Image (spheres, rainbow, N blue to C red):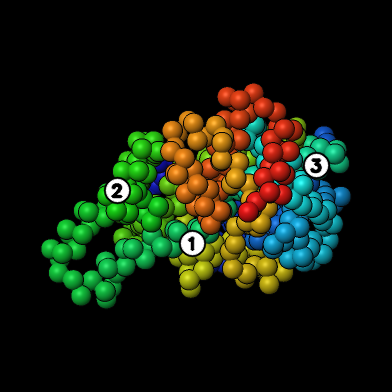
Amino acid sequence: MLDVLETARITGDVSSDAEHTATLEALLEDSVGLHCIADTGVATACSSGVDSGLITALAKRFRPEVHGYVVDPQLGRSEAEDAGRTGRHVGVPLRRVPVDRDRFFDLWPRVIWHLESDGWHASHVGLLALAEQCRVDGVKVLLTGEGADELFGGYPLQALSLKMWRSWSWPRRLLHSKRSLDRRFEHQRRAPYKVSAGNHSQMERNMVLRALSPELNFLQTEIFDRLQPVAPPADRAFLGHCLYDLYSHLQDILHRHDRLSMAASVELRVPFLENRLIDFAIHLPRRQKYRDKTGKWLLRKVAQKHIPRQNVQARKIGFEISSEFSAGTETLLRGGFLRDAMKWPTASVEDMIQFARREEPSRLRLVGMELFLRLHAGGETTGTLTEALHAAARDRS
């Protein structure tokens, strides 16, 4: 990616908003058209957001018979109603994929089996449920919206990286001496983005570094330095964070989603990640990605022409699965494999159970590790683990 990055294209960009909008729309239409080519049924994953909604609207032009899918959790918040607004607007029927607690417990161990990891995010269950519904319906190809947030600046953390560097923006830099700014610049350059391990305390940083690959740690500074001609530093940090997410966050997403979709023999296709679109996006200046406190500014301009304005303007929310789905399963940690593997004292086991009870992300990770060990060290089946999850939830105290 860095090998083809031409910073002169960013700094020398003089195209108008209208020109950029027209170019992006044309590139997206071409890419969706290419990704719709198949000798089998094609559908889309259509949430309430901008990315998948826009892909769904454009796919209708090439596949008039296309339909969409939306995961519909039966506990907590569901995107199904908002996604339905997009479907009605573009004339694409949506099929809801309901996920209740029984289905969640059935799929969770299988997610861990297919990912060969602890299955740390509840949304993985939703994706496997969606892919399996595609298989039942005979759909072999599913278009999704992955890549848009990384390419066009849609994550809140990217905007926070921009804010970290505002001391160098006019007129704020007048409040600091040049020596102070230079010293701070060198310190911050080694941890230029909000996701950088260097932005945490020394203890937190050491813990994070143990889990991260060295190349990704040092890549942050390499990207920031590669964007040196871009000014001010806040713009440079924002664009750098977007590029870094392409290398790190997106790679992880694509790996997990590919495994879970192929577990149901469904091919996920990602129209945003077409070569010409990537080239166009990585050479956009910050103002085309983040403007007026709004991420994906340019992409939203295109989306306004195709999907409901209410969905375009909605606050970004990730795919949510209520913490109630996994509530109570933390008791599996009592007398389990993870306790023995980590050599926890008896008193510590109870502390960890209480911790997992309070903190859903920790519960998913800890119970996921327990399920992983029972699968691969204990020889249990996904079916017996589903039964164990049900029992734990019934017996929670």
Q: Pointer 2: what residue?
A: 203
Label at residue 134: 3
Q: CA distance from mark 2 to mark 3?
A: 45 Å
**The C terminus is located in which quarter?**
bottom right
| Type of the residue with mark 2 | Met
Q: Nearer the viewer, mark 1 or mark 2?
A: 2
* Location of residue 246 in the rendering, given as x and y in whole percent from the top left corner: 49, 45
Q: Secondary structure at mark 1?
A: helix
User: How far apart are the alpha carbons under marks 3 and 1?
Assistant: 31 Å
139 sits to left or right of 285: right
- Image position, residue 378 (x, y; %): 61, 25
From the image, tell me which residue sits under label 1: 156
Which residue is located at x 70 percent, y 57 percent?
Answer: 47
Residue drawn at 51 percent across, 58 percent down: 155
Foreground pick, 158 / 103: 103
Residue 338 higher or lower than 223, as above or below: above
- Could you tell me which residue is drawn at 56 percent across and 40 percent down? 334
Tag 1: residue type? Pro
